[in-house]
Image: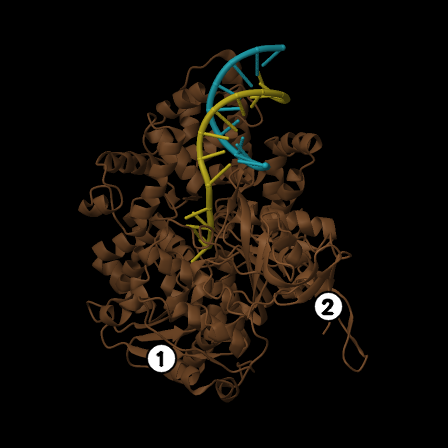
Chain colours: A brown, B yellow, C cyan
Amino acid sequence: MVNTVEPDEYLSVLNPEQKAAVVHDGSSLLILAGAGSGKTRVITTKIAYLISQKHVDPASILAVTFTKKAAKEMQERAVALDERAAKAQIRTFHSFGAFFLRLYANEAGINGNFTVYDDDDMVTLVSKAVPSLTRQQAAQAAHKISLAKDYCFTPDSGELGTIESDSAFADIYDAYEKRLRATGNVDFGDLIMLPYLVLKNNEQIRARLHYRYRVIMVDEYQDSNVAQFLLLQQLAGVEENAGVYVCVVGDDDQSIYKFRGAEVQNILNFQKQFPGTSLIRLEKNYRSTSEILSCADSVVKNNDDRLGKTLVAVRGKGKQPTLVFLPTQDDETQFCAELIQQAHKTQKDKDGNKVPGVPYSDWAILYRTNAQSLGFETEFLHKKIPYTVVGSLKFYEREEIKDALAWLAFCANQRDEIAFRRIINKPTRGIGDTSQDKIIAQVKEGDSILSGCKAVKLSKKAADGVKQFCELVEEFEEMIPNVEATVEAEQPVAKKTADPGKLSYFVEKVVERAGLVEYHKSQDEIAGTQKTANIQELVNSAVLYPCTKAGLLDFLDHIELDRTMENAEGEDGEKDSVTLITLHNTKGLEFSRVIITGLESGIFPRDDKTGEELEEERRLFYVGITRARDELYLTSCGLRRLYGSTKYMSPSPFLNEIGKQNIRILGQAPSSFSYAGGGQTKDDNPLAQKYCKGASVYHDEYGHGQIVHTEYSNDGEYVVSVSFETGGVKRFLPKYQQKSLLIENN
DNA sequence: CCCGTCGTTATTTTT
DNA sequence: TAACGACGGG
């Protein structure tokens, strides 16, 4: 028996809706899967079920996700259910695109050896294609070009105006495309757009693909863009009734990437675009307590543009979420630090038994912008709370890594202008910008840049440098056999990076001989960085690939397409630390305890957000809330340092949307907050609890009185106003006057 | 070529 | 405020 788990067994753990989704057949299927409703389980089970019960050939199943991580997890879980799932194509959209383009490079008008340019490279290429642009204009144009490709708009497309009204843009886009095609490489947008165009224009290839892929599943469909929809449509062969089974899974309430071209309408209109679609809702939430869930629901129901669903908590009621109003952002970081530290201590329950403290790793601090992590980092460092910042500076965009990758990319494709410019003069070989331009100008269409190096006339110094460079390239060339490209190359497992059969051997030689190691080693010594270690990490990761051209391309694909690669010290995944993370980055994650910070108007949501965009911000808030399993805290500050000056902040409008019964409030709510003065307000500040509104006091100078008002001053001090029997109201700072202002017990 | 200084500019970012 | 990029002097 091949199965790792019996179908009866894996089906029996599903609830009725999940099971219905797994066994569904005969038409397209839209699964609306709420947060924490077990959607990955459904997809993976469906894959196993199709293979074992419906006798679908695993290789004819194509499952696409958006992140490498998601693809990996899906693959692993499917294989755990049925090991034949290892033969299924479980990939990211982009890696599928890359795979497709290597097969049909000719039809797409590109080089089969292409590598993928990232956003940075795009900017460089735009400024080379249109030198009159400033760097900033180039960056803007590059961004618009990506966006255009997200909609499959070509430079001559009439609809380009919806992206940019300036007619000059089409020319910039066109110039960029010509320059890009000359390199033989592609950008991220091409990985979707080109396959779409090939399929659309080539009936034969389309038919071949329809024959090959009988089942297509898409995860996180709410985040797909128009180009991805168009590609899916071609693969599914909707128009020609190709009989391909399409199943998409997503949650319209969790669509948070509109700004990057994601189109919620894809999921909202799926039933129209794929006629006869069945709809299954997964509304049982296995993650959060019902208190947290109803809090989330009270927020997201304020959105108009949604299919609508109501999550039901399977777990118990749990603890009510807490909203904390704090005077300043420093109080916010302190509050979080103390909350976490307090919980971390070993505590005693009511019977006096020791209860282990809450591990740091149970906690996540969520914020809207990366910059907000700074305050928490400072405070945590000070209080010695271990933390991990997720996603701020990424491995792949580090200078040294980009350098090494550029060398590798150039070895793979010697028409790669961007890579060439990056490596030719690093370390210095006396070849400046002008010499580089001259070399490029010498290259005839379709030729290697090396031919330009040989044809060009330069000064003695530059010519020597170029010669040196060419020799290096030729040396590397000999090291890497051009074995027939097996696109789906098996990845042999090995440990030794020094094995000449492994790509790591090649990578190590390249970074060494090209002078990169030496170059960055000196940088490390000056700046105390760990660039050399990062390069070593890159070498290590190449051990999984064979030392061939195909292996190199495969490696570059995986690096280029995997932006979530951990940094060098990230090996110890076990480290007990608090997670600091942007709201966007939390998608797909969950934590026992979540603190969503900076809930202030202007920060979250940003104040330029209205209409659809405001709804997206609200969904982002919803995503944040639904990450929490057990406890949820929301913090909002009255005062925040912003762009140099200190600003008064008012609470996020989203806070007013939370049902009163769904939240417990601590701290002094500003008057602009609708619950303010509702009498429900509590404050965890011990002073505020002692000197609360209505308390009778005795002052040694003014006599008996009553506290009629409490507030926090601008600098965060707790202030009480006391009305004395003798008449007159005085204000005090209890912090300094605990001795002279006494609380009277009746 | 490297370093300092000045000025500019502040989202989110699966691939 | 702070961080980063551009530019100019040594």
Figure quadrant of the N terminus of chain A: bottom right
Q: Are marks 2 and 1 in contact (CB under 8 Å)?
A: no
Which residue is labeled 1 in the image?
A280
Q: Which residue is located at x 38 percent, y 41 percent?
A: A185
Figure quadrant of the C terminus of chain A: bottom right
Query: Is A50 or A270 nearer to us in this picture?
Result: A270
Q: Which mark is residue A501?
A: none
Residue A297 location (% of width, % of height): 43, 72
The answer for which chain carries disc 1 is A
Query: Is A451 or A425 nearer to us in this picture?
Result: A425
Vertical side of A182 occupied by A702: above or below? below
Q: Are marks 2 and 1 on the same chain?
A: yes
Q: CA distance from mark 2 to mark 1?
A: 63 Å
Give the structural element (helix, strand or loop) at label 1.
strand
The answer for which chain carries disc 2 is A
Crowd band around label 2 with a 10 angstrom C-alpha radius: few (<14), some (14–19), many (20+): few
Horizontal side of A78 relative to A61 (left or right) equals: right
Residue A442 location (% of width, % of height): 36, 23
Give the structural element (helix, strand or loop) at label 2.
loop
Which residue is labeled 2 in the image?
A744
Vertical side of A532 occupied by A583: above or below? below
Between discs 2 and 1, the one toward the N terminus: 1
Horizontal side of A513 relative to A201 (left or right) equals: right
